[in-house]
Image (spheres, helix red, strand yellow):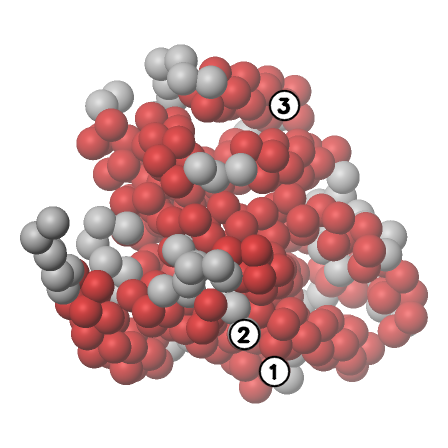
C-alpha cells in the first residue's frame, strides 16, 4: 500500500460514507483535502470494524490489531494497514495529539460491549472519544488564526459533539437494530419511553417529545461551536460553515418531520446540499487565492 493509494482509499471512504462532510471538504484548498480525508478515513475504518463483524470476538481481535498497528505507525514503523500510511503521515505532518487518537480508539472499543448509557454525562464521556476528539484532530489541519489555537479547541470539540448527537437522533432505528441505544436511559425514563418503543414502526408521542429534548441539546452544542469558525484561517471557514449547515440541516429535517426517525432515514435533499456548497464556493476560492499571494522581499 503506497502513500498515494492510502490517501486515495481514505478519500473514497469519506466520499462513500460521509457525503455531507465530503461535499464540505471540496471547499478546502486542494492540498488540505487529503489530510482531512486521512483523518476521516481512519475514523470510518475503525467504525466499520466495530459494526461489520458478526462475532464480538472477531471484532475485538480486529480492533486490537488496528490499535497495535496504529501505535506502531505513529512510532514511525512501516504501516501494515490500508489507511494507516496516510493517517500516520497526516498525524506526523500536523502534530496531531496522539492522546486524541488513543481516546478515539477507546470509544470504538466501548462499542464492542456497551450498548446503553445511563445518563447524558455517561454518553458525553463516550462522545468525547468518538466525536469531540475528531474535532480537535482536524483543528491542526484546518489551522486556527495565529494565537487562537487554544481558544479554537473547545468550539472544535463542541462541533464534533453536535455532529455526533445529530447522527444519533437520525440513526435511532439503525442503532436499535444493532442492539444499541444512544439515548440516555434516564431520559427515556423521564419521558416514559421504553427501549421497545424504539423498535416500533412509528414514534409514539412520548418518543417524539424525548427526541425534541435531545435535539435541543444538539442545538446547544451547535451554538457553542459557532464562534470557533471565525477562529480558523479564512480558507478553512467555508468548509466548516458548509458542514455546520449541512449537519444542522439534518437536525432541521428531523424537527420538520415531527421527529419521526423510525419510518425513514432523514437526509438533506440533494438540491439543498448543492445550494449550500455553491453559496460558499466563491468565498472559498477567494480565500484560497488570497492565501496564495505571498510577497517575497529581498534581504
Q: Is residue 90 left or right of residue 158?
A: left
Please report whichever mark, 3 or 2, sits nearer to the chain's N-terminal start. Answer: 3
- Element under disc 1: helix
Residue 236 appears in the picture as rendered: yes
Residue 198: which numbered mark, if any? none
Q: Is residue 97 left or right of residue 271?
A: right
- Residue 143 in the image: state x and y as whole percent: 39, 55
- Residue 253 in the image: state x and y as whole percent: 52, 80
Report, in whole angstroms, how far the alpha carbon at label 2 lies from the one at label 1: 24 Å
Residue 243 appears in the picture as rendered: no
Q: Name the residue rendered at 66%, 26% in the picture.
A: 56
Tally the marks. 3
Count neighbours of disc 3 (C-alpha within 10 A) and say few if under 14, some if 14 to 19, many if 20 or more. some
As displayed, is residue 193 above or below residue 69?
A: below
Count neighbours of disc 2 (C-alpha within 10 A) and say few if under 14, some if 14 to 19, many if 20 or more. some
Between residues 72 and 217, which one lies in front from this camera angle? 72
Residue 255: which numbered mark, if any? 1
Give the farthest residue toward the front: 299
- Residue 213 in the image: state x and y as whole percent: 76, 76
Residue 227: which numbered mark, if any? 2
Q: Name the residue rendered at 63%, 72% in the picture.
A: 224
Between residues 98 and 179, which one lies in front from this camera angle? 98
Between residues 38 and 197, which one lies in front from this camera angle? 38
Of the residues tagged 3 and 2, which is closer to the observer?
A: 2
- Residue 190 in the image: state x and y as whole percent: 91, 70
Give the quadrant of the N terminus.
top left
Of the residues tagged 2 and 1, which is closer to the observer?
A: 2
Count neighbours of disc 1 (C-alpha within 10 A) and say few if under 14, some if 14 to 19, many if 20 or more. some
Residue pointed to by mark 3: 60
Report, in whole angstroms, how far the alpha carbon at label 3 lies from the one at label 1: 37 Å
Q: Name the residue rendered at 40%, 13% in the picture.
A: 77
- Element under disc 3: helix
Amino acid at each position: 500500500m503506497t502513500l498515494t493509494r492510502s490517501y486515495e482509499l481514505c478519500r473514497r471512504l469519506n466520499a462513500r460514507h460521509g457525503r455531507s462532510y465530503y461535499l464540505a471538504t471540496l471547499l478546502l484548498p486542494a492540498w488540505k483535502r487529503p489530510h482531512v480525508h486521512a483523518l476521516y478515513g481512519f475514523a470510518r475504518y475503525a467504525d466499520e470494524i466495530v459494526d461489520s463483524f458478526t462475532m464480538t470476538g472477531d471484532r475485538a481481535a480486529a480492533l486490537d490489531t488496528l490499535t497495535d498497528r496504529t501505535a506502531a505507525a505513529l512510532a514511525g514503523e512501516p504501516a501494515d494497514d490500508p489507511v494507516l500510511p496516510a493517517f500516520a503521515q497526516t498525524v506526523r505532518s500536523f502534530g496531531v495529539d496522539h492522546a486524541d487518537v488513543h481516546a478515539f480508539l477507546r470509544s470504538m472499543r466501548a462499542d464492542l460491549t456497551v450498548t446503553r448509557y445511563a445518563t447524558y454525562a455517561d454518553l458525553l464521556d463516550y462522545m468525547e472519544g468518538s466525536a469531540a476528539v475528531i474535532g480537535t484532530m482536524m483543528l491542526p489541519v484546518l489551522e486556527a488564526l495565529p494565537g487562537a489555537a487554544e481558544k479554537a479547541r473547545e468550539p472544535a470539540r463542541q462541533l464534533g459533539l453536535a455532529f455526533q448527537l445529530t447522527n444519533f437522533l437520525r440513526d435511532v432505528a439503525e442503532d436499535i437494530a444493532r442492539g444499541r441505544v444512544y439515548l440516555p436511559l434516564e431520559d427515556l425514563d423521564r419521558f416514559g419511553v421504553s427501549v421497545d418503543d424504539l423498535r416500533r414502526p412509528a414514534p409514539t408521542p412520548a418518543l417524539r417529545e424525548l427526541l425534541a429534548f435531545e435535539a435541543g441539546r444538539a442545538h446547544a452544542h451547535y451554538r457553542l461551536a459557532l464562534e470557533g469558525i471565525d477562529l480558523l484561517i479564512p480558507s478553512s471557514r467555508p468548509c466548516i460553515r458548509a458542514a455546520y449547515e449541512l449537519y444542522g440541516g439534518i437536525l432541521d429535517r428531523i424537527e420538520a418531520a415531527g421527529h419521526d426517525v423510525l419510518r425513514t432515514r432523514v437526509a438533506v435533499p440533494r438540491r439543498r446540499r448543492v445550494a449550500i456548497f455553491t453559496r460558499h464556493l466563491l468565498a472559498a476560492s477567494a480565500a484560497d487565492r488570497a492565501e496564495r499571494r505571498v510577497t517575497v522581499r529581498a534581504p
